[in-house]
Amino acid sequence: MPIRERRSATLGLALAALLFLLPLLMVPGGPVPLEDEALLPPATLPIDRTPAVTASRDSGRPVRLQRADGTVEELTMESYLWGVVAAEMPASFEEEALKAQACAARTYAAGLQAGGSKHPEADLCDDSSCCQAYTDREDALLRWGLSAQLYAEKIETAVSGTDGLGVLYQGTPIQAVFFSSAPGKTADAVEVWGSAVDYLKSVDSPEGDEVPNYHSQVRLSPEELKNKALAAWPGADLSGKPESWIQNLERTASGAVSSLRIGGITAAGGEVRGAFGLRSACFQVQWDGENFLFDVTGYGHGVGMSQYGANAMAKEGREFRDILTWYYTGTEVDYLW
């Protein structure tokens, strides 16, 4: 090979070597280890795989709540339902029972918002005898003590886990009434309120003696019973012997007292319950020679969903949808909004 060609080849090899080594010479300490990613030049940015946070259906739904002092607060449906479930159902209950309660409460509220409210400036109030019970979060946490965090999270899960869901009959939100515990069966609406409702029929309810105060007793002296009876039925004739004052008990298919005669006047079982302070209209009454004894089973008006029954069903493995469609006959669970 001529000298000039050898020099050109040598020069080419030297330049190639220099181009290869130059990046290494520019980095102190030699080549960059592949595992030292902090020193590598950035390539494409990492993909953000965090799911997008979307607002819940309930959080966008306002609720105007009238408090006991007459003031009106505006809450989200989400916050309102937390307070209702915390007030209406023991937080120690099974999660599926709490979810059923959240759905029933949401449906009840939706019905009042749609035009059934009794309050000109509000959708609902916090009085359970009028609308639904409600408690502030701070009061609930204080009441729960050491279980506060656990119970708060359970109720949050019940509300968020049923977000926007309610109970519908033929596409319309139902009147989702509920009560504490049934004496083996719930009551048909016609038995209690005199009007038939297609989805408020009598059904079996599985709770029993595990319910606190499932069986209760009210003892009234003749004077006490007379005063209470005359306040409720002023025309009652209670002049005879006490053992003759109460007669002719009639019962419904669910076992509750539908009516009885007191001092010659026919009174509905629900009226008797209210007049004498009984926990339910499912009772036996007897005169023991000195007092009237009312032996009562269950607690509440008896129509719709039994809360302790819902908890018993949840313990059996039933889901909240099953519980709701059991107690509200012929209904379905679907989105309200």
Image (spheres, rainbow, N blue to C red):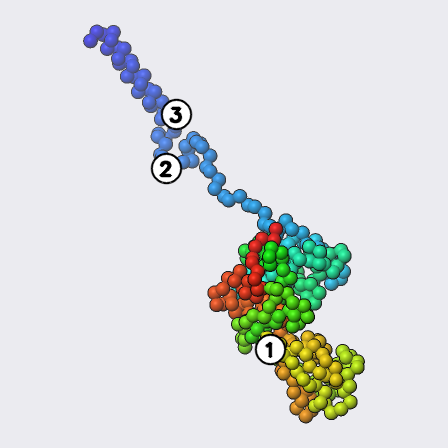
Cα distance between the residues tagged 3 and 2: 19 Å
Q: Which residue is mark 1?
A: 255
Residue 110 lies in what quarter of the image? bottom right
Placement of 185 over or under 141, stated as above or below: below
- Three-letter code for the amino acid on which mark 1 is drawn: Gly
User: Pointer 3: residues within 10 angstroms few (<14), some, or many (20+)?
Assistant: few
Determine the image quadrant of residue 222. Answer: bottom right
Residue at image coords 65%, 81%: 250
Q: Amino acid at mark 2?
A: Glu
Viewer-side residue, 60 vs 184: 184
9 horizontally vs 185: left or right: left
- Left or right: 96, with 288 as reference point: left
Q: Nearer the viewer, mark 3 or mark 2?
A: 2
Residue at the (24%, 8%) spot, across then down: 5
Q: Earlier in the sequence, mark 3 or mark 1?
A: 3
Report the residue at 67% width, 89% height from top.
287
x and y, in percent, of residue 318 in the image: 49, 64
Note whether residue 150 is visible. Answer: no
Q: Are marks 3 and 1 in contact (CB under 8 Å)?
A: no
Q: Secondary structure at mark 1?
A: loop
Q: Secondary structure at mark 2?
A: loop
What mark, if any, has residue 35 been given in the picture? 2
- Structural distance between the alpha carbons of marks 1 and 2: 77 Å
Give the CA separation, mark 3 to mark 1.
94 Å
Q: Is residue 101 visible?
A: yes
